[in-house]
Amino acid sequence: MEKSTDTSLYLRVNKQDKDALEELYDRYEKILFSFLYKMLEDKGLAEEALQEVFIKIWRGKGVYDESKGKFSSWLFRMAQNTAIDLIRKRKKPTVPIEEASQMVSNDEPVEEQVVWQEKKTQIEMAVQHLSAEQQKMIDLFYFKGHTHETIADMCDIPLGTVKSRIRLALKKLKTSLHGMQERGAYDD
Amino acid sequence: MTNIDCDYLVDYLNGTLTAEENQQFEQHLTTCTECQEIVEATGQLPYLADPVEPPTDMKARILSNVFDETVEQNDQPKALKPAMSPIPIHKKRRKENVWKPLLAAVLLMSLLGNGYAFYQLSDQPAGTETAIQSIELQPNEAFTGTATAAMIEEEGLLNLVVQADRLAELEASQVYQVWLIKDGKPIPAGAFSPNPNGEGASYYQLETTSEEWDTIAITLEPKTGNELPEGQIVLSSEI
């Protein structure tokens, strides 16, 4: 049987189809959890954020349609926003309770792992095309959820230019990702 | 105009636009290839994360909470397992009305100063196992108020009733916030403001048992809805 697309699953979720939500959950659990863990550095918080994301989807709080681009990008953005909310709510950074190294698993389903690894390699290469400052800015903006003020401080740039610098960094990221696609290194 | 819309990109990505601006930007996205492509490229950043194995029982927990939310219309107070952090405050006290009689009864009994009667009363719901624990909270040095907490366990739910008196008046935005704490991790468990007589009470229901907590504390918070304490602890006790 052909695999349902994310969008068709999402449409079923809109009709309160629990199986469809479960399938979406299975599809994205690991990448979302890993991503949220990278952002929040705490397993409990990552779980809380992940739950919040699926509650939002289930209740139809965020609305997706294909005009907004790929479903995964939309989902990741929602997860990233949810994590930022959590980061900003707690003033102090959390202390990781468990050793991250203990949590990295070695027995992945092969296919999932391969796809992930490919994308990871590709985006890592794209990131390497950025200047050190741009890399730092993306990390602070995207993964750490820092405010523009903090980013201005940490990157030692004027507050007024933070936004345009982030945009520039993301634009360059896009361009180098595209460059790789055109060379056939990327197949989505 | 296009430039102004493109300027929204960064705020769009970190979710700081208002609903209206968001909609406006999404409209812009349908016509601006560059912004579209940047959004898509950004959407691949999560793959930079190193694979981390999710806890095996996480799926069951999350899905049951997600589906529960719908049934409960999202506002029954529900603390997650202690490992999971504070509950969003908007979920609090939906069953307040249902429990008002209990709260009223607890207050009445407490006024009578008869702990035993309270025990009997709370035992009334027939056929369910009920465990009750009453706790006197100790004030910190500077605080003059007193408070008692009753933890009533029933069918896997913990009902926490807190009653306090001799409370100082608060400024408009302040609130007394009750917390349950395990290993230094607090979750909000009810809040109250004193009435003109300096009395206050809260009721909170959680999916947990009293054994899961080691401390109960009340803080004076600068505002309602805090999910982690900002203010000073004014009353507390071990459980």
Image (cartoon, coloured by chain):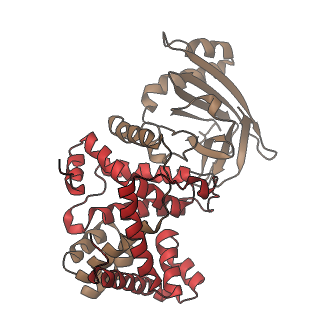
Residue A118 vs residue B9, the one in the foreground: A118
The residue lying toward the viewer, choosing from B222 and A131, is: A131
Q: Quadrant of residue B218?
A: top right
Residue drawn at x 37%, y 57% is A112
Q: Is residue A46 visible?
A: yes
Please indicate whether residue A21 sits to the left or right of residue A149 in the image.
left
Chain A shade: red
Question: Which chain comes out brown in the rendered image?
Answer: B
Above or below, comparing residue B122 to residue B88 in the picture: above
Q: Is residue B24 above or below residue A10?
A: below
Q: Where on the picture, by quarter, is residue B82?
A: top right
A82 and B225: which is toward the camera: A82
- Residue B179 rendering spot, x and y as whole percentages: 62, 42
Residue visible at 61% across and 40% down in the picture: B196
Q: Quadrant of the N terminus of chain B?
A: bottom left
In x, y percent, where is residue B202?
56, 35
Pick the residue in front: B145 or B162: B162
Residue at the far right: name it: B141
Residue at 33%, 82% in the rendered image:
A180
Task: Note whether residue B173 is visible.
Answer: no
In this view, B63 is above or below A24: above
Q: Position of residue B37 (x, y in %)?
A: 28, 78
Image position of B94 with respect to A34: above or below: above
Which quadrant is the C terminus of chain B positioned in? top right
Find residue B107 and report its horizontal and vertical position in percent.
59, 25
Count of labels shown? Answer: 0
